Amino acid sequence: MKNQLYCCLAAAVSLLSAACSPGGESVGEAVAGVPSVIVSRSTDAAFESAAAAVVNMKVGWNLGNTLESNSNEVNGWIEKWTDRSVKAYETAWGQPQATRQLMHEFRKMGFGAIRVPVTWWPHLDADTVINEQWMARVEEVVGYVLDEGMYCILNIHHDTGDQSSCWLRADAGNFDALNARFVKIWQQIAGRFRDYDERLLFEGYNEMLDVKGQWNFPSVPTAYDAVNGYAQSFVNTVRATGGNNAKRNLIVSTYCAGNGGNWGDCNKVLSLFKVPTDTAGGHLVVEVHSYNPWQWDKEHGKWTAANAADIHQMFARLNNHFVSKGIPVIVGEYGAIESDTTETDQVEAGKYAACIVSEAKKYNIATFYWMGLMDGADRAKLKWTRPIVTDSILKAYYGDAALSTGIRAVVLD
């Protein structure tokens, strides 16, 4: 399918932009105190800095419900009712297998990075050795992304979380045993990809929770110690594998990938997070996720100035804790996950997405939309499931230079 460049109506564009400017400042305008970043690509002698990589990513997308698909329990339905093949796992959550053509569509539109979530536990033997067929498929999909000239983020995904199968917990009391398994997995991943270039980044872990599976902030303060311990262990392990991993840009996440907030102890996920020490200076990134404000889009919700103010506050927190101190940040997941594909819902979700992207750009933060832009059977057809949302993301980042999916612009109320 070929995408064409369409002209968007100015009224729609201006209203989408205004949706994230409750304070009156112009969208995309740089914020005072944000460090400048030299974004030129590196020579063969040295990797580009983490800060430069994040800026060069521009806007990104998550290849969700694909390589992270699993039964949510050990020896669950995939293990019992399928042939346990690579394809059975990859398609278990309703998505077709990933293709090079899919990555090409995102690159063609202007996306600069793809996050590839991977769940590893179903593919480990009793000695924590990764199944070779699974590793080869992960490497193949990573190659699809890199061959298109995009950045690729590869992680450990639903080994963390709140399901019974999620073994990687922020559990200080059991840290040594869990960390030994964590290290062995990363030794294999890092070893496999050690000679890949700077466009491949590793993300140590996804949304790590404590033993009770508590979101937002942990039920016990020692969980912060565990998260900090895994972050440091991840960096040490990857660096020790040598090759390009000696200076590869690495990503570490806060507890539950939380972005802070005024409820309960939410802000402690930022204030108590310790960025690891690193033998390679300037090659670490902090990751958070944002579905703020939670369920604003449920039952055809409308994007409001109050919602936009919440996003302003989130980025101000990230700037205060990290960006202003020279530590680059990505929003590894965001999305209007409760909205549907109707034109009305897409318009509201488009306002939300434009708000996230335009605010992030002020702070040199890259953003990764969670799934929905091209979803389900549409992926096999290379058809945009949410073209209005996609156009809103691109317009918020590129302005008048943005390409369009070809959907007609909608005049907003």
Image (tube, helix red, strand yellow):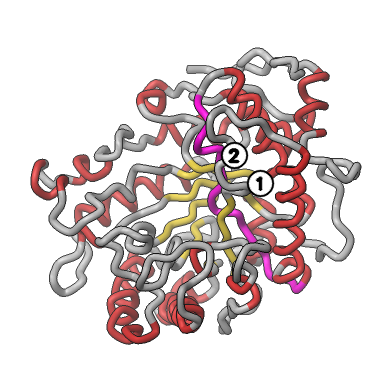
- Disc 2 target residue: 111
Q: Residues within 10 Å of mark 2 (few under 14, many from 20)?
A: many
Circles 2, 1 touching at the beta carbon (< 8 Å): yes
Q: Quadrant of residue 120?
A: bottom left
| Residue visible at 20% across and 64% down in the picture | 124
- As displayed, is residue 31 above or below residue 227? above
- Under mark 2, the amino acid is Phe
- Under mark 1, the amino acid is Lys
Q: Residues within 10 Å of mark 1 (few under 14, many from 20)?
A: many
Across and down, in percent, residue 403 comes to: 67, 26
Across and down, in percent, residue 253 comes to: 53, 67
Q: Quadrant of the C terminus?
A: top right
User: From this viewpoint, is residue 143 visible?
Assistant: yes
Q: CA distance from mark 2 to mark 1?
A: 7 Å
- Disc 1 target residue: 58
Q: Check the image and name the residue furthest to the front.
A: 264
What secondary structure is marked by label 1? loop
Q: On the picture, is 87 further left or further right than 325?
A: left
| Residue visible at 71% across and 43% down in the picture | 307
What secondary structure is marked by label 2? loop
User: Which is more N-terminal, label 1 or label 2?
Assistant: 1
* Residue 336 on the magenta span: yes
* Of 349 and 361, the residue lying toward us: 349
- As displayed, is residue 247 above or below residue 14? below
Q: What span is in magenta?
A: 325-340
| Residue visible at 57% across and 31% down in the picture | 108
* Residue 239 on the magenta span: no
Q: On the picture, is 239 further left or further right than 164?
A: right
